[in-house]
Image (cartoon, rainbow, N blue to C red):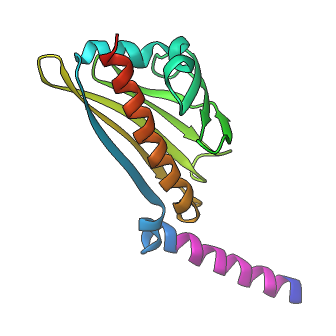
């Protein structure tokens, strides 16, 4: 009898917590974004070709040190990230957007959808002849997002480092 009562209380608490995150103020805590931008002196085609040349990433990219796979929508990639502190993270996101010379995005997840998901996006906007704005972003969502503020700040720093390295790679070709 006591087990049934405790089980019922636990279920009610679980429903309240999930409700808080899905429809209450907690929903705001389940969503975080990183948005970075940089102007690159090169055409959107040059920037795109550098981003899509996965085999060359180890030569210039200090953050995304390796990508393998097909860049077509629905295909999985094998991605290896490295932070300045030398920690390495491997994951296998799926390509969710690919508009030539314009947008490339993938979605990764931790174990299952909704726990900790990230949509990593590169958008190229040609703002003048041979001048491209790179919008490099990621939208994080899921139950664990509220616990990773410190890690997301490091990730944003890594985006800036990668953006600068991409700029140097394109402009020095």
- Give the quadrant of the N terminus: bottom right
Q: Nearer the viewer, residue 22 or 126?
A: 126
Q: Nearer the viewer, residue 135 or 158?
A: 158
* Image spot of residue 144 (x, y percent): 59, 60
The reply to whether the magenta stretch includes residue 124 is no
Q: Residue at x 56, y 38 (%)?
A: 108
- Residue 1: in sight, yes or no? no
The reply to whether the magenta stretch includes residue 5 is yes
Q: Residue at x 65, y 80 (%)?
A: 12
- Give the quadrant of the C terminus: top left
Q: Residue at x 50, y 69 (%)?
A: 21
Q: Is residue 31 left or right of residue 12?
A: left
- Magenta: main secondary structure equals helix
* Image spot of residue 116 (x, y percent): 58, 51
Numbered range of the magenta stretch: 4-19
Displayed quadrant of residue 129: top left
Q: Is residue 135 above or below residue 98?
A: below
* Image spot of residue 72 (x, y percent): 46, 16
Outermost residue toward the left in this view? 128
Q: Nearer the viewer, residue 137 or 83?
A: 83
């Amino acid at each position: 009898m006591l087990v049934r009562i405790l089980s019922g209380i636990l279920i009610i608490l679980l429903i309240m917590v999930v409700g808080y995150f899905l429809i209450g103020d907690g929903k705001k805590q389940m969503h975080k974004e990183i948005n970075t931008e940089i102007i690159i002196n090169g055409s959107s085609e040059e920037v795109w070709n550098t981003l899509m040349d996965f085999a060359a990433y180890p030569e210039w990219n200090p953050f995304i040190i390796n990508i393998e796979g097909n860049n077509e929508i629905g295909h999985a990639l094998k991605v290896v990230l490295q932070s300045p502190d030398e920690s390495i993270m491997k994951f296998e996101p799926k390509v969710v957007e690919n508009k030539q010379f314009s947008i490339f995005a993938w979605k990764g997840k931790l174990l299952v959808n909704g726990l900790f998901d990230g949509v990593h996006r590169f958008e190229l906007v040609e703002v003048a002849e041979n001048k491209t704005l790179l919008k490099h972003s990621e939208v994080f969502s899921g139950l664990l997002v509220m616990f990773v503020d410190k890690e997301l700040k490091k990730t944003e720093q890594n985006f800036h480092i990668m953006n600068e390295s991409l700029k140097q790679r394109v402009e020095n070709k």
